[in-house]
Amino acid sequence: MKPEEGLTRPVHSGSCLCGQVRYELTSDIKSTSHCHCSMCRKAHGAAFATYASVLKEAHSFTGGSQLLASYASSTEVTRTFCSVCGSPMLWHSKGEFADWVSFPLATLDTPYTPPKQRHIHLASRAPWFQIEHGWPQSDAY
Ligand SMILES: [Zn+2]
Ligand SMILES: [Zn+2]
């Protein structure tokens, strides 16, 4: 096999809660972060949203793309989700990292262990979210 063929094979795949929206990743996954900002908390209905990133060209929807809906949560950021089950599927910013897309790591179906994880926007975390003593240790914010 030629090396360039290897680049187009899916490395990872994922899906939404109802299983109709499916996606594939053709590259390794970068920068896993747990975002505590108020918009991610609302969008996910959770204490924080765990996102990882790939280059835009490495992410493609392989099923259910007609079911996707989008919401511009700010002038820069678009959040794409399954209109049937509500699973967040994609986060994209027109800003500095416009070539990248972020996806909720919880939608991944293939096994993956991030080499590094960080917590971001901890300053706006939910007041009811208790951070245990000494955790998270790697937080730089
Ligand atoms: Zn769905
Ligand atoms: Zn956020």
Image (cartoon, rainbow, N blue to C red):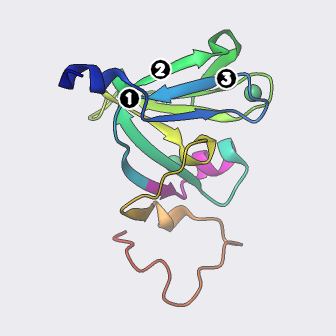
The amino acid marked with disc number 3 is Val
Q: Is 61 situated left or right of 46 in this image?
A: left
The stretch of residues the image draws in magenta is 33-42
Residue lying at 44% horizontally and 56% vertically, measured from the top left: 33
Label drawn at residue 21: 3
Q: Position of residue 109 (x, y in %)?
A: 61, 41
For label 1, the SS is: loop
Residue 25 appears in the rendering = yes
Q: Would you call the spot at circle 3 few (<14 residues within 10 Å), some (14-19), or many (20 or more)? A: many
Residue lying at 37% horizontally and 75% vertically, measured from the top left: 138
Residue lying at 36% horizontally and 62% vertically, measured from the top left: 115
Q: Which residue is mark 2?
A: 60
- Disc 2 C-beta below 8 A from ligand 1: no
Q: Quadrant of the C terminus?
A: bottom left
Q: Would you call the spot at circle 1 few (<14 residues within 10 Å), some (14-19), or many (20 or more)? A: some
- Disc 3 C-beta below 8 A from ligand 1: yes
Q: Which residue is mark 1?
A: 26
Magenta span contains residue 110: no
Question: Which one is earlier in the sequence, the residue at label 2 or at label 3?
Answer: 3
Question: Which one is earlier in the sequence, the residue at label 1 or at label 3?
Answer: 3
